[in-house]
Every structure is written in C-alpha cells, then in structure tokens.
C-alpha cells in the first residue's frame, strides 16, 4: 500500500513540493503574490467577484444519497445484511466560516473528463460566469488524491491535472504519475511563453489531463487571428 503524507500545518505548495520533489514556485509560470491568494482547505486560489463559500452536505442531501445507496445494496447484498451510517461535518468554531475546498471553488471542473471536454471546445472559458483566475488544489478521495492547477489570467489558459497517487498502486506507478505531472508543468510553462509572444494567436488553451481511459494527454487548442480553431493532442502517459 502506498500512502501520501499531508502536513496540515503547511500550505498546499509546501506539501506538493515535498511530494513531487520539486519547487513549484520555480516551474509554475508567473506565480501570483501571496496577498492576492485565498487559502482554503487544501486549495489556494485567486478569483474576482464574491467570495466562495464552503458547501457541506445537508441532512437532506445525505438522506437522498443514503436512499439511493440503500436501494443499490438491497439488490446487490440483500435487505438487512448491511448498515449505513453518515456523520454530518462538524460545525466551524463560533464566528468563523469553514474554509472552502477545491470542490466548492470549481465544483464542475475538478474531474478529468471536464478538463478534456473544455480543451476540445471552441470556448475560451469553461462557463460564462467563470470567476476563478488561478488555482492550485488537491482533492482527497477514499483511495486516490487528484491535483488540479489552472491559470486563466490571460489569453493563454493553462490546466494541469491528474492523479497524484493511488493508495493501492505500486511505488513505480505512483512515481510515474509524479513524473508526468512535473513534465506537464514544464511543458505548459514553455508553451505559454511561446503563444504569448505569437501575434498570430488570438488565444490558446493548454490542457494536460487524463481522458476517460486514464491516459494522460496534452491537448493544445488555439484560435488564430482569423478565428480558425486548431486542436493538437499527444499522449503524456498511458493509464496513469
């Protein structure tokens, strides 16, 4: 079993630096100043407009999920053969709001399929009311941890995302994941500089993420000054 250590006393960048064995401040292009960033729960971000609020599940949400799970378990396991229990998140200390998570800030844009669909679309932003300008965060799930980085501050949009580690995978597979993510950061930095200095490019999207089959891809979408869309794809790693 492979595990990931996360120091809650340290920030997102420090934890990722230790895990990836790199200094992200050196390989992320044009890192925002700390005063402009908001620190949430395992995520830091820049935004415009109203502040993002943490949205924990309500009792009604949990009941709806429990009803669906009960119906599925009744069919697969049998009635009375299991027990389901849920605990609501603990309320924050009096006078304090709980810190927003990545799923609160970019709720529909944290999964790999959304990154790939965005990369292949002719739209410059994922949504008309998009408010996130820069983000770096980690989403912990039951067996995996996913990382998402995005920089939407100018006409060259960058997304680097992927699985950081899988709890039941080998050390070699997890090391390969880290290598692909670091390589993606470096390629994104190089391509961003290239397209920013190209007067024939109206805008570009540089997306490094996994597709439905788990293959890590580089998807480069550009719009030239005449409005012609061009999409190039290449494989970064198989089944990561």
Image: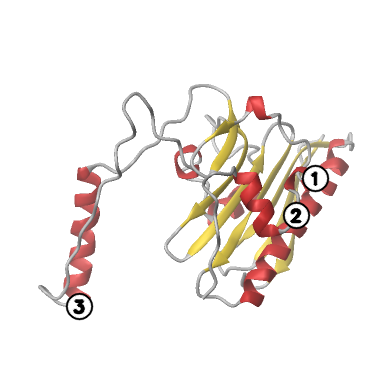
Tell me which residue sits at (51%, 70%) in the image.
Answer: 167
Question: Distance from label 3 to label 2 (Cα)?
Answer: 46 Å
Q: Could you tell me residue 176's position as x and y percent? A: 69, 70
Tell me the tag on residue 77: 3
**Closer to the N terminus: mark 1 or mark 3?**
1
Question: Distance from label 2 to label 1 (Cα)?
Answer: 8 Å
Task: Say which of marks 3 and 2 sits in front.
Answer: 2
Tell me which residue sits at (65%, 47%) in the image.
Answer: 14
In the displayed structure, would residue 96 be above or below residue 16?
above
> Which residue corresponds to mark 1?
26
In the displayed structure, would residue 106 be above or below residue 83?
above
Q: Could you tell me residue 123's position as x and y percent? A: 63, 39
133 displayed left or right of 231: left
Q: Nearer the viewer, residue 118 or 184?
A: 184
Q: Could you tell me residue 89's position as x and y percent? A: 30, 45
Q: How crowded is the residue under tag 3: few (<14 C-alpha within 10 Å), some, or many (20+)?
A: few
Q: Nearer the viewer, residue 15 or 143?
A: 15
């Amino acid at each position: 079993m492979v595990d990931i250590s996360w120091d809650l006393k340290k920030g997102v960048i420090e934890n990722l630096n230790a895990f990836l064995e790199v200094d992200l401040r050196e390989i992320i292009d044009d890192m925002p100043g700390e005063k402009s960033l908001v620190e949430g729960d395992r995520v830091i971000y820049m935004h415009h407009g109203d502040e993002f609020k943490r949205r924990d599940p309500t009792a009604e949400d949990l009941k709806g999920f429990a009803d669906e799970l009960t119906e599925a378990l009744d069919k697969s396991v049998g009635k009375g053969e299991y027990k389901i229990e849920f605990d609501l998140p603990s309320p924050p200390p009096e006078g304090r709001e709980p810190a927003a998570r990545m799923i609160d800030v970019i709720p529909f844009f944290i999964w790999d399929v959304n990154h790939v669909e965005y990369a292949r679309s002719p739209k410059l932003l994922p949504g008309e009311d998009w408010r996130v300008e820069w983000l770096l965060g980690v989403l912990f799930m039951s067996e995996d941890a996913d990382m998402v980085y995005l920089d939407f501050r100018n006409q060259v949009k960058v997304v680097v995302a992927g699985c950081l580690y899988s709890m039941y995978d080998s050390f070699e597979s997890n090391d390969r994941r880290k290598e692909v993510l670091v390589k993606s950061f470096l390629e994104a930095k190089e391509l961003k500089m290239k397209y920013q200095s190209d007067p024939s490019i109206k805008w570009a999207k540089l997306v490094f993420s996994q597709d439905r089959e788990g293959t890590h891809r580089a998807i480069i979408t550009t719009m030239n000054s005449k409005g012609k869309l061009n999409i190039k794809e290449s494989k970064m790693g198989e089944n990561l």
